[in-house]
């Protein structure tokens, strides 16, 4: 009985040891190979010096990123936490942590910390025919980032964060992102005239934030940027939004194939010409839905009028009146009667009380890109009508 129990215990130990042996360990080299395959369209290749495996964690030591035809850039160790095989030959990674950056080139020093990706999905077969076969991540973030010139900090931000959410049944994606705590020191601008103007405007240092959100529907290829905003104190908020359709998976795959063919061609001039022609052809598949750009003033306009007026020996109010008189003459050169009247009225309204300016392009029905390109080449003055352009102020 003793020998039987001893033998059973030994066999159990052997089985457990076998399960824990390197044969069953994560294959980091395979993961990186599939990552590069899925990321091929970007033209970036990831390489490493060695891989350290620790349970379900991998560390790529001496990691480098190399653009096609370019020189490799060292990015240090990259740690992948919570790595798991998905059962189909692909991988999921809970968190990817990048090494902090502290790099100096010439007079410029860049630092960045706490950079990471979350919810990374690396497909086994990156054919791009569905969301399941595309490289995907759920979130990306960074801690503080600084840029210094000659030892003086000229730009910084406190953090960045982005999120991507799959729609039900993989019908599309929704995304959002923020960049917070943006600061810039404009007192270091080298051009004396520009530096003097910046000082007069009281903008030697500026601070603000940026935000973005939108979505993508696979069936129609509707790609929308619902918000892309830059908001700076004592300057104003610039908002941009647009939507195009036709940006389907087939379009993306065709674009990827064109890029890959260009990268494989050793004759760079020929490759660039071929890529340009391919892109022009692909653009024919897209349709313009709408676009909007607006600026909400936060005292910048009055400051500019005061500064420019002082240079002309007049007050800011007198400068505004002068611009109101010049605007119709300048706009008349556009040869767009309907739009000219809108612009002139909007400029007058805005200069009297600077609050907001908005330009909207909203055609009655989506406009194919070939129609826009045809109008631009044959009759440029018809583009506002084709796109349904309107200009408004203080609304």
Image (cartoon, helix red, strand yellow):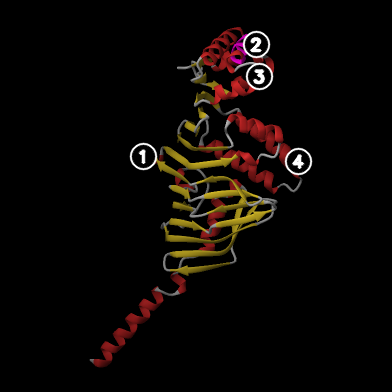
Quadrant location of the N terminus in the rendered image: bottom left
Q: Where does the magenta region start and end?
A: 319-328
Q: Do the CB atoms of the residues marked 3 and 4 lie less than 8 Å apart?
A: no
Dot 2: what SS?
Answer: helix
Crowding around mark 4 (Cα neighbors within 10 Å: few <14, some 14 to 19, many 20+) is few
Nearer-N-terminus badge (3/4): 4
Q: CA–CA distance between discs 1 and 4?
A: 43 Å
Left or right position of 72 against 55: right
Position of residue 96 relative to residue 329, above or below, is: below
Q: Main secondary structure of the magenta part?
A: helix
Tag 2–tag 4 contact (CB < 8 Å): no
Q: Nearer the viewer, residue 173 or 199?
A: 199
Residue 168: which disc?
A: 1
In the rendered image, residue 312, in percent from the top left (x then y), is placed at 68, 18
Residue 59 in the magenta stretch? The answer is no
**Mark with earlier residue (1, 3):** 1
Label 1 with label 3: CB-CB less than 8 Å:
no
Cα–Cα span, label 3 and label 4: 27 Å
- The disc label shown at residue 376, or none: 3
């Amino acid at each position: 009985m003793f020998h039987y129990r001893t033998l059973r215990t030994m066999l159990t130990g052997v089985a457990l040891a076998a399960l824990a042996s390197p044969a069953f360990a994560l294959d980091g080299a395979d993961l990186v190979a599939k990552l590069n395959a899925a990321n091929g369209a970007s033209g970036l290749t990831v390489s490493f010096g060695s891989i350290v495996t620790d349970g379900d964690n991998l560390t790529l030591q001496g990691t480098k990123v190399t653009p096609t035809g370019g020189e490799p850039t060292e990015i240090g160790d990259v740690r992948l936490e919570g790595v798991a095989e998905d059962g189909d030959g692909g991988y999921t990674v809970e968190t990817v942590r990048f090494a902090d950056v502290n790099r100096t080139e010439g007079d410029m020093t860049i630092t960045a910390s706490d950079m990471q990706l979350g919810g990374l999905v690396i497909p086994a077969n990156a054919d791009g025919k569905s969301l399941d076969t595309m490289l995907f991540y759920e979130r990306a973030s960074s801690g503080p980032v600084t840029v210094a010139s000659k030892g003086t900090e000229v730009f910084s931000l406190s953090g960045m964060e982005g999120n991507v959410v799959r729609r039900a049944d993989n019908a599309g994606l929704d995304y959002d992102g923020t960049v917070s705590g943006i600061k810039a020191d404009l007192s270091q601008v080298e051009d004396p005239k520009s530096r003097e103007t910046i000082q007069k405007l009281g903008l030697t240092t500026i601070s603000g934030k940026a935000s973005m959100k939108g979505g993508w529907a696979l069936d129609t290829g509707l790609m929308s940027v619902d918000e892309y905003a830059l908001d700076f104190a004592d300057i104003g908020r610039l908002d941009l939004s647009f939507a195009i359709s036709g940006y389907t998976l087939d379009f993306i795959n065709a674009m990827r194939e064109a890029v890959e063919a260009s990268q494989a061609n050793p004759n760079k001039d020929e490759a660039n010409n071929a890529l340009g022609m391919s892109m022009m052809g692909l653009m024919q598949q897209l349709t313009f839905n709408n676009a909007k750009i607006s600026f909400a003033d936060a005292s910048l306009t009055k400051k500019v009028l005061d500064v420019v007026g002082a240079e002309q020996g007049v007050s800011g109010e007198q400068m505004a009146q002068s611009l109101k008189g010049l605007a119709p003459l300048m706009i008349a050169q556009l040869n767009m009667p309907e739009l000219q009247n809108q612009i002139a009225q909007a400029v007058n309204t805005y200069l009297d009380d600077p609050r907001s300016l908005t330009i909207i392009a909203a055609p009655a029905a989506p406009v194919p890109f070939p129609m826009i390109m045809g109008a631009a080449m044959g009759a440029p003055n018809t583009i506002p009508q084709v796109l349904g352009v309107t200009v408004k102020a203080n609304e």
